[in-house]
Amino acid sequence: MEFFLQLVVSGIVVGSIYALVALGFVLIYKATGVINFAQGEFLMVGAYICLGMVTTLHIPFWIAFFLTMAVTVVLGLIIEKVALRPMIGEPIISIIMLTIGLSSVLKGAVQVFWGPNNRVYPQIFSQVPLHIGPVVVSQVYLWSVGFAFLFLLLFTLFFRFSPSGIAMRAVADDQQAALSMGISVKKVFAMAWCIAFLVAGVGGVFLGNINGVNISLGFFGLKVFPAVILGGLDSIPGAILGGLIIGVLEALTGGYIDPIIGGGTAEVAPFVVLVIILMIKPYGFFGTEEIEKV
Amino acid sequence: MSAHICGDYKTTYKEDMVLFQTTFSKFWIIAFIIALYAIPLLLGNYTLYVGNLICIAIIGAMGISILTGFTGQISLGHGAFIGIGAYASGYLTMKLGFPFIVALPCAGLITALFGMIFGIPSLRLKGLYLAIATLAAQFIIEYLMVHMEFITNGVLGMMIDPPSIFGFSFDTDLKYFYLTASVAVLATLYAKNIVRTRPGRAFIAIRDRYISAEVMGVNLFKYKLMAFGISSFLAGVAGCLWAHYVTIITPEHFTIGVSIEYLAMIIIGGLGHVIGAIFGAIFMVLLPEVLRFLSEVLSGQFPMIVNIFAALKQVVFGAIIIGFLVYEPDGLAHRWQMIKAYWKLWPFSY
């Protein structure tokens, strides 16, 4: 039972980071109709930027953390402007391929600057674990879950109440109508990419603190697909729920099935779930069903 | 013969669909094929090695071109399908003792079967959802390749002998080139041919307006599955030839990166053009070779370039894909048509 709870807790921690990354992913999909295969690389870039500031420039962690957020926003702006803006109106496959190209560029660029080796953050959070009932939780886990939920809450409120958030929802709903109401669709697109990069970057910083930073962080982005499909491709609550479920599922298969049939099951289990969902309920828990009319 | 003075003059549909449009083009295609078989005799082993890789890539690219370029079904699992072909052929020849000439089509058929199984969701899923479903197929197949050790030998890899047909062993780069080039020519002819038949027209109709296609009596399920089958068959053949060429295969050879490379090939070459797949395959195989050459030249001045070569390669690869999509969305095939049109009217291209 303790083992089970331990797995669930670590699953929730990883799942909350999945949820953050999935939030950015869903946001881009909702507002601009683009599926972003570079979301995992955004996460990786965020982790590396913060790491660079802390280890090379010796900036205190919390300042570096906020600086990283600023830098990722700028990067998001640049990427939207240079690569995505010209693609408006192109077929889906071209846009998918463009984000794949983007992920390749980011992955390569990170390796050019930081090399392929695994790197670790200096000790930032206290090593003393906390005991919650029978479960032992290290502090960095609590911090990352806390921040993940803070951001998820902030953005949920942002979409619900702030004028920009409402404008984004309007664009997601109907671009033409939003344009005629005086909303700048360009600005909304730029904002979507900024927020997506920002939340992924934050997730990356915490994940880096837990697992260390290396190039395989980029594969995190691919895990987001099961999460968003499970929750529904265009639903923010769905992304959060899907992220948590996939995180827990991964931890449980890793803990129970891996020892029996050898490693790697945790990596593939989310994709098996993905195929099953696509077969029986392709629009997930909260996704909008596309109804086609002739 | 229709004269090429100013455009093509045709009076029947049949004339428009002829494989060789003019005697002129027929002549050049035959000349090209003769050159394809004659020139390798003069080439060194490294060039032939690159040539072999190109021919294998062309076969695989033809497959994904039919599926994605003509039928509009995005597949991110092509790399895994190539892997199935490679392992199937390896298992058939090495463990069951099949002759190569039987194993080659069998590998294709086995892969086609897998492709059709993973193609079934395509009836319900489109665009983004299908891309994600094939992505899942890629990971699941990769997992199976690592874990079904009784067939694939897991991460240790599988040793495969060079093939021999009726006692003639293809054990040098030159001999192998004749094999891969012949299959590549056949695959190209097949692709060129199928797009002008009923299935080919059905594929294009599904890509352009699938609802209209269905209304007009195109059986969506049948033709989508057929596209998946043909595409995976060619992927399997490419995988089989590749396996017998490199003689050792591990699951690492068939990752998502390979799928992406093949997709990049047909996008750089031009979606929906048979010749685009050829251009794209040549481009994508030559790119790393050219980059390696450049890094060797530059390593005199910048010694650190060798260390970051792999990373730079990735940056350039991504940048080229983005560049093509932004500046030349119709790919190399379109550029080729522009060049041809220019010379057709030269020097009076007013």
Image: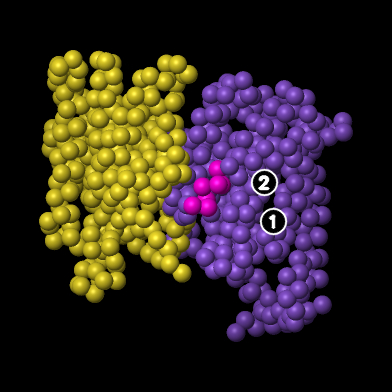
Chain colours: A yellow, B purple
As drawn, the label of residue B191 is 1
Identified by mark 1, the residue type is Ala
Where is residue B235? Give x, y as percent: 64, 43
Q: Which quarter of the rendered picture does the N terminus of chain A lie within?
A: top left
Q: Measured along the vertical axis of the image, is residue B235 above or below residue A177? A: above
In depth, the one of A66 and B155 nearer the eye is B155
Please tell me which residue is depicted at 62% across the width and 29% down the height of the picture: B249
What secondary structure characterizes most of the magenta part?
Answer: helix
In depth, the one of B171 and A96 nearer the eye is A96
Residue found at the far right of this picture: B166
Q: Please check the rendered image and state whether residue B122 is part of the magenta-colored stretch, yes or no.
A: yes
In depth, the one of B285 and A141 nearer the eye is A141
Location of mark 2 (residue) = B234
Helix, strand or loop at label 2? It is helix
Chain for numbered disc 2:
B
As drawn, the label of residue A219 is none
Q: Quadrant of residue A87?
A: bottom left
Q: Are marks 1 and 2 in contact (CB under 8 Å)?
A: yes
Q: Which residues are magenta?
A: B118-124
Q: Is residue B61 visible?
A: no
Helix, strand or loop at label 1? It is helix
Residue B279 left/right relative to A286: right
